[in-house]
Amino acid sequence: MDRGIGSWVAKQAFRRGDKVALVDDTAASDSFTYTQFDDRTSQLGRALIALGVRRGDRVAMLLFNSISFMEAIFACAKLGAIAVPVNVRLTSHEIAYILADCGADVLVYHQALGATARAALEQQGVRVRHRVVDTQGHQAPAGGSGAGADRDGLDAGELDYDELRDSATCEPLGMDVDDRDIHAIMYTSGTTGRPKGAMLTHANAIANARNALLLGRGLRSDDVTVTVAPMFHIGGLGVHSLPLVYVGGKNVIQSGFDPVRLLQAMSGYRATVQFLVPAMWAALTRVADFDAYDLSSLELAVSGGAPAPLPVIRFFRSHGVPFQEGFGMTETAPSVSVLDSDHVESKAGSIGRPLPDVEARIVDEHGRDVPTSSVGELVLRGDNIFAGYWMMPGATAEAFEGGWFHTGDLARCDEEGFITLVDRLKDMIITGGENVYPIEVEQVIYLHPAVLEVAVYGIPDDTWGETVVAAVVVKEGSTLDSEELINHCRERLAHFKCPTVVEMVQELPRNATGKVLKSLLRERHAGTTTSVHR
């Protein structure tokens, strides 16, 4: 078992068993030492075996951030089963697709999500044999699924999570888990179609944990983080949550994001490392009494999932927070590169330089390296790269053409080795023969003080082939018109890159993972073309 990540908990229990591993900051501030964490995961693993779960079987998890989430991940790892975290914001139809696609044998879910879970379980193709319900006080957090809490007891056939775990002994499992075995299937967001299940091995998680030791000032056993980014996404799970178990640190777990509660926890628990997505960091900047919270313990603040707007970067730097950005993907477990705090402002928009254990190239359509500062596709290689897509050999072969993982991201690399993503291959705009990369335009628009959110995309144009459109959400209490924003862009960008159409919208359409659905924005213009002058 020493080759699987389940051994991490046992090793930390041996080395520092009395040290606090997990704190539940959502319910009654329960805390568990590494010895308790090890015992509870062994109990859950044995209970799953008693249900008939075997090595390679899939255990789906429809869970908010919680102690039970961490227990389920490591219990599966100990017995060699495959954990399948499921986004709690998905509809029952979307959940049913994942359950059927991965062939889940067990579904573990919070009782607050019971209505959605039961609706998913009733749909065609779902063959879950056992339903396990965590009933212990986890209400749907703000901005959650909206399914509502059904607390009128368990339905027939549902097993109580705590009772199931506590029914088994905590004797070590002693399972023979190979590091090449799959430890988790993480489903991609599916912005271009059905989600794909990325198969992550134990070796991938181990490589990612070791990469985390090289991310900025690295991780240490005395580190503390507040795990509030959803762990059903690879960022919330893989940037700090799993690696902190590897080094013996402390995870303070919050089930949902509230800016004030997060600042209270970061201050109260003396967080030393923190991962958030840009929208979360931005929300912290809008807390009226931000300066009342003591963040002096914070030594590593990591943003990822999308480029952080420059105003957000500057805010935290001005408050003495060592802010940096990381880039990763579900398929890379996730860490690929880091834009360190020394360069986070001067190289804003870059994803930084690859971590030492990650190989990166930028290639043309024939797989040949492109010259410095030229645009090509970013391809990767390393022990953190996933094993392929579940039951999708064609998609897997395409992704690994030439022996490198093809990210689908257009990028360029400067003379100092800093990589900048210029956009997804499918999102690049070609106008008048010129390539326009929406991320570049979005970063400029974010500099306007009235802009809260923006999405840039292309629509057909009779003269130029495509023209640039910006969908903008204006900050509450601010005003902005199209002409003002276009002039703002023209002062900072070549005219062909500037929006010719500006749409003021109440909100941007997003999928369940929070990514902006530019396809839906484009659909508004389906069947129409423009003819603009610039």
Image (tube, rainbow, N blue to C red):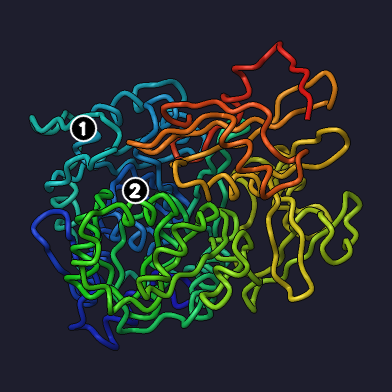
Could you tell me which residue is drawn at 57 percent across and 29 percent down? 482
Tell me the number on the disc at residue 191: none
* Other residues around mark 1 within 10 Å, as few (<14) / some (14–19) / many (≥20): few
Image position, residue 151 (x, y; %) = 10, 33
Mark 2 falls on what kind of element?
A: loop
Circles 1 and 2: CB distance less than 8 Å? no
Left or right: 86 in relation to 254: right
Left or right: 255 in relation to 515: left
Left or right: 402 in relation to 156: right
Instruction: Say what amino acid the circle numbered 1 marks.
Output: Gly
Image position, residue 306 (x, y; %) = 53, 52
Q: Is 89 in front, or is 349? A: 349
Picture quadrant of residue 383: bottom right
Q: Is 137 in front, or is 305? A: 305
Instruction: Say what amino acid the circle numbered 2 marks.
Output: Gly
Mark 1 falls on what kind of element?
A: loop
Query: Which residue position holds label 2?
Result: 52
Tell me if residue 224 can be seen: yes
Could you tell me which residue is drawn at 30 percent across and 84 percent down? 222
Instruction: Give the foreground label among 1 and 2.
Output: 1
Label 1 – label 2 distance at C-alpha? 15 Å
* Other residues around mark 2 within 10 Å, as few (<14) / some (14–19) / many (≥20): few
Image position, residue 488 (x, y; %) = 60, 43
Query: Which residue position holds label 1?
Result: 157
Could you tell me which residue is drawn at 69 percent across and 70 percent down? 418
Picture quadrant of residue 224: bottom left
Query: Does label 1 or label 2 sit earlier along the sequence?
Result: 2
Image position, residue 405 (x, y; %) = 72, 57
Which residue is farthest top?
A: 527
Compared with 506, 390 (above or below) is below
